[in-house]
Image (tube, helix red, strand yellow):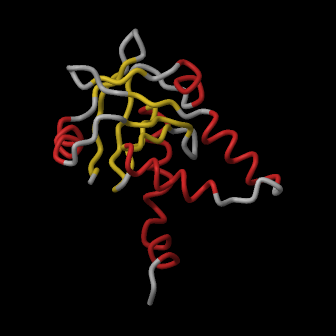
Amino acid sequence: MFYGEYLHSIDKKSRIIIPSRFRDALKENGIERLYVTRGIEECLFLFPENEWKVQENKFKTMSFTKRESRKFNRLFFGGAMPVEPDKQWRILVPDYLKEYAKLAKSIMIIGVSNRIEIWDKHKWEEFYNTSKENFEEISENLMDP
C-alpha cells in the first residue's frame, strides 16, 4: 500500500503533509483516520486505521505479567494519537512524538508496505548508510532458502 521515500518538511505548527502517492492509496481504500505513535529506532509509525486495529489486536495478546510486554505496550499505545488529515492532507504531530523522533525541519516519509515511517532526515540518512552495506546479508538471514 505504501512504498517509496519522500523528502518533506515539518512546519512551525508541527504539521506534516502526506505524500500524494500515500494520499491516493488512503483515498482508494476509504481511509480517513490514521494513528501515529512511537516507532523503533527513533522514528514515528503512522498506521491507517484498519492496520492499526490489526496491530492492536496482535499486541493486546501479549501477557501484561511480562515486564517487556508492559514496557512495549506502554510506549507504543501510550504514545499513540489518532490523526485525521486536513483538507491539504496535513497531519499534526504532537510535540512529545516530535521530540521522541527528534524531528527537525527536514524529514523523510518512508512507505513500509502497511505503515508509514516518519524520520528526521539526518537520522534516516544515518540509518540508511549504516544498513545498506548489510542489505544482502540481512536478506540472506531473513529469507527462506
Quadrant of the drawing holding the N terminus = bottom left
Q: Could you tell me residue 68's position as x and y percent? A: 77, 53
Q: Residue furthest bottom?
A: 145
- Nearest the viewer among 30 and 37 is 30
Residue drawn at 39 percent across, 49 percent down: 115
Quadrant of the drawing holding the C terminus = bottom left
Q: Could you tell me residue 60's position as x and y percent? A: 63, 54
Residue drawn at 24 percent across, 26 percent down: 89
Residue drawn at 57 percent across, 44 percent down: 41
Q: Residue furthest top?
A: 12
Eyeballing the image, is 55 above or below 107?
Answer: below
- Nearest the viewer among 60 and 16 is 60
Q: Could you tell me residue 135's position as x and y percent? A: 44, 66
- Nearest the viewer among 143 and 95 is 95
Q: Number of marks in the image? A: 0
Residue drawn at 42 percent across, 40 percent down: 46
Q: Could you tell me residue 133's position as x and y percent? A: 46, 61
- Nearest the viewer among 58 and 101 is 58
Eyeballing the image, is 60 above or below 86?
Answer: below
